[in-house]
Image (cartoon, rainbow, N blue to C red):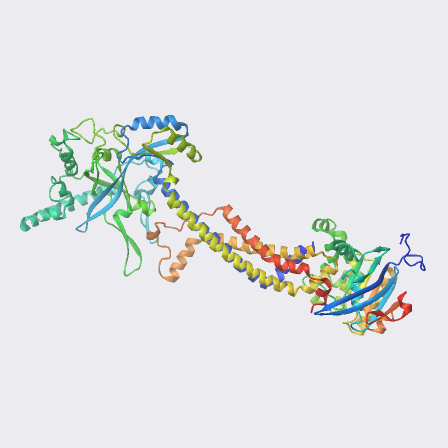
Amino acid sequence: MYKFLLATRYLRTRFIALASIISVTLGVATMIVVNSVMSGFSCQMRERIHATLGDVMVEATSMDGTDDPRQLLADVDALAGKYIESVTPTVEIYGMMSFRWMGQDIYRLVTLVGIVPETKNQVSPLAGYLLSRQKIEENDKVVRLPLRDVTAPLDWSLTQDAIQDRKDWVKVRQLEDLSREYQSIGQGRRAPAVAPAAATGTVDSNEFSLQFAAGNSSSGSNDATVNDPFAAGEAVEPIDPEEPLPARIFVGAGLISFPFKEKDTGLTKTQYMASPGQDVILTTIKSGRPEPAPFKATIVDVYKSGMSEYDSNLVFCNLEELQYVRGMLSGPDPTRPHENLNWKDGAITTLQIKLKDYRDAEEVVNRLSQGLNLHYQVRTWEQKQGPLLDAVQVESAILNVLLFLIITVAGFGILAIFYMIVVEKTRDIGIMKALGASSRGVMMIFLSYGLSLGVVGSGAGVVLGLLFVRYINEIEDLLSMISGHKVFDESIYYFHKIPTAVYPSMVIWVALGAMVIAVLASVLPARRAAALHPVRALRYE
Amino acid sequence: MTSKRSILPMTGQPPHLCAKALDKAYRKGEHKVPVLRGVDISLHRGEFLSIVGQSGSGKSTLMHLLGLLDEPDQGEVWLDGARIDKLPMSTRDELRNHVFGFVFQFYHLLPELNLLENVLSPLMIRHNVFEFWRKKRELREQGLEIIEKVGLTHRLRHRPSELSGGEMQRAAIARALAGRPSVLLADEPTGNLDSRTGQEIMTVLHKLNEQDRLTIIMVTHDDVIAGQAQRIVRLSEGRIQTLEDAA
């Protein structure tokens, strides 16, 4: 009884000891903040990766994919149908994207992903990362409200704004073409030098000339004999230039934008070089032969997940068009090549699968990799992104070790101050022993004193840390205001707000760790106190 | 008292507390400094004994040995016909708590606790948390009763630093008595007080001795104070001076 009474009294009267636990408090608070932000980041990252990949991926080992998606679907269904919620096919292939901006041609290396929007959105919720469904904020001001509802079905239609943009863009193009033609007459046709599409030989000097079938006719004429015997001879139907092209894409934000700092305000802004409604030229590889396959596509939307690896790399295209361009698929009616295409008739490279319960992933991967032949590789999304996720894990583990060392340093502070207190309390220890307290009892006083210091210190640390995490964005605003520039720049990190995730288990472990360290630090002084001889302790002056 | 073994056949009854041929030396660096050289002492229940001697005569050490605060190098300590100096540590701790009450020259109250808590501290040591909470009221009554006996009821919530010397010493006596011991060991209880307050303390001790038949051993260097006891033992250089005192 006296142990606890004295421990709490010491706690209340020895302020120097309270000072020693401030370091514990700060250590605990820092650990909680860092862990929360780290796991917030990694949580968001996983979410974003997951939103691009499915739960389980069946990938063809060949770039040309499988010719018979129907068989593959049937096999997958037979092998693991009961675990699967939905499946979406994709074709993934490298490519190059080019577009004109400010009179220059911009080239970008991309990964083209052919998707079926309806099922893709079921397998991995892509829609939320499209800019037309988000409000755009810049420097904490809402620049634009969402153009459509996040829950609206995902398809390849343009928004009203994009249609309007396209009209303006087409007009500007027409004017540019006119002036270029005018100039080229004067300068003796120098135009081909700036026209990449001219390499195909059949396209007119200017890639963005209004022969809208150019992309298609170029591919058509190149491969006419092999792929599409009728296409070459067909007269291309006249198409309204204001109508979007049959090939539509969601383009990664990083591919068509760059951040810059405004000189006079110091604010970071994002400059877009292309916007929905405009056309870009994409060049990819034909299936089966190492030949380029260029085509034009209309940007429908901008994809911004916050994973810069994806945002500056991915271009989502409608699956059938990509299959068609790569020569993986041809429509039933050669005169109208873009109509009635069905991806199941062509080839696909990847099958993305959403499971009913992700905990079955291992089982599904096992079944599929055993059941399917060697032309397929079956992985979960975590396995596919393994190195990245591991890197984050290692990073946070190292940080944790370092921060825990800080708390250990605090432990040594406690040890020193405790030693002092034991010396100061020598006579009291003698009295307690004279009154019949056992050595163990005296030791317990100091151990429970250490524990209560640890409890108070880590308790305050937990409260401080959680408050910091709760108001981290307000704190960031304040710091930005004081320092005069943005501490957490959203254009660098892609997040509007600093993401945080607090796991109770993490908080409990950190608090427990701090308490254990406080108790361990008090063991040595407590043992010294217990070993004091009562008579010598009483004589101590 | 009921023991059949008679240690001193002359008296017929075993003494309450007795010491036989106590030897004790302290080490000071290389040298061994003898403090007690064969001290025999015995006293009966209800006796008031004072031990007098100059500084360094070993009187405090003798008291510590009798109260089991220290172990003799040689010799024995007996309580009610049972040897107690070689008992295991935990048993000795319990005996100190149950049988002996200590009063020191410098009061030695715990500065963090108030008067009532200080007085109750032997009881807190005796009982664990649950027992203490269960008997809280009863133990509190016990403490209050003793505080009343030493006349400090008006100071219950005061910290030792807020009390005068005499009050502190009375509080220390109350603390020593809270565990209802049978022997009170007082080490220079008046040594730090002026003669009037010292006399007050002596009055309290006399009252306890007479009314409650409390056995008291008091160490002092002041002959006037010592003279108020029933019996005086004079120590000099670790030996008992007069033969008659050795009893």
Question: In the rendered picture of this protein, how many numbered marks are placed on residues?
Answer: 0
* Vertical relation: A538 (above or below) A175: below
Residue A306 is left or right of residue A175, and the answer is: right
In terms of image quadrants, where is residue A79? top left
Can residue A149 be seen in the rendering of this structure? Answer: no
* Vertical relation: A396 (above or below) B187: above
Compare residues A184 and A528 and report the one nearer the observer. A528
Whole-percent x, y for residue A27 in the image: 50, 56
* Vertical relation: A468 (above or below) B217: above
Residue in the image at 17% along x and 51% along y: A103
Can residue A110 be seen in the rendering of this structure? Answer: yes
Residue B53 is left or right of residue A262, and the answer is: right
In terms of image quadrants, where is residue B66? bottom right
Work out which quarter of the rendered image holds the C terminus of chain B and state it. Answer: bottom right
Compare residues A139 and A160 and report the one nearer the observer. A139
Whole-percent x, y for residue A209 in the image: 13, 43
Whole-percent x, y for residue A83 in the image: 41, 30
Compare residues A81 and B83 and report the one nearer the observer. B83
Whole-percent x, y for residue B191 in the image: 78, 71
Residue in the image at 22% along x and 28% along y: A340
* Vertical relation: A184 (above or below) A244: below
Residue A472 is left or right of residue A3, and the answer is: left
Work out which quarter of the rendered image holds the N terminus of chain B and state it. Answer: bottom right
* Residue placed furthest toward the front: B30
Residue B205 is left or right of residue A301, and the answer is: right
